[in-house]
Image (cartoon, rainbow, N blue to C red):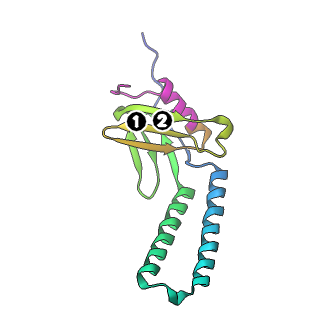
Amino acid sequence: MSAQAPDLLATRAEGPAFPPLVKLMATFMVLALVYWGAAALIQAGPRSLSTGSWLLVGGAFVITLVAYIWMLKSRTSIDGVAIEQTWLWKRRVALADITQAKFIYVPWLSWLLAPRLIVRAGPGVRVFYCADPKVIRAFSALMDGSLPRTGASE
């Protein structure tokens, strides 16, 4: 006889995708990019850039800002059915669709390197970052087979 699978609601875990220090480093990098970018634009002179150059600089700034904001807001969740991460678009993989998984977690470096679960589901590979201890434990449970996932093969 096999042990009874845990309740799906009891296995739900959710938390931020990136650790606070990673978010702080990203903040410093974005501020440095804005500071030195503005200094370079001032030194070159605003009139020296063509319209296409201004569009390129503006587009790069918007893309950087959007990615930065979503990095700060991003959350990862896992339950007995799927793994999800919010981002500019939501990443979602049903546990039953996972054919391969690799959990990269170095406990003494998790303040610098965000733990991540890399999964293959169908033709693509998806990466889910996690910084919350509950999500890390759930990812570990998924890797050792104690988190239920119906219909999946490893």
Q: In which quarter of the image is the C terminus?
A: top left
Residue found farthest to the bottom: 47
- The residue at 33%/27% (across/down) is 151
Question: Which residue does the image show at 57% across and 81% down from the upper left?
Answer: 41
Q: Where is residue 91 in the image (x, y as percent from the top left)?
A: 41, 48
Q: Name the residue under label 1.
A: 81
Q: Mark 1: which secondary structure?
A: loop
Residue type at mark 2?
Leu
Residue 150 is a magenta residue: yes
Residue 103 in percent (x, y) is at: 51, 34
Q: Which residues are drawn in magenta?
A: 136-154
Is mark 1 in CB contact (under 8 Å) with mark 2?
no
**Residue at the image position 61 percent from the left and 83 percent from the top:** 43
Front tag of 1 and 2: 1
| Residue 129 in the figure: left or right of residue 122 | right
Q: State the CA–CA distance, disc 1 to disc 2.
A: 10 Å
In the displayed structure image, the side of residue 23 where residue 3 appears, left or right: left
* Residue at (63% x, 52% y) in the render: 22
Q: Mark 2 points at which residue?
A: 9
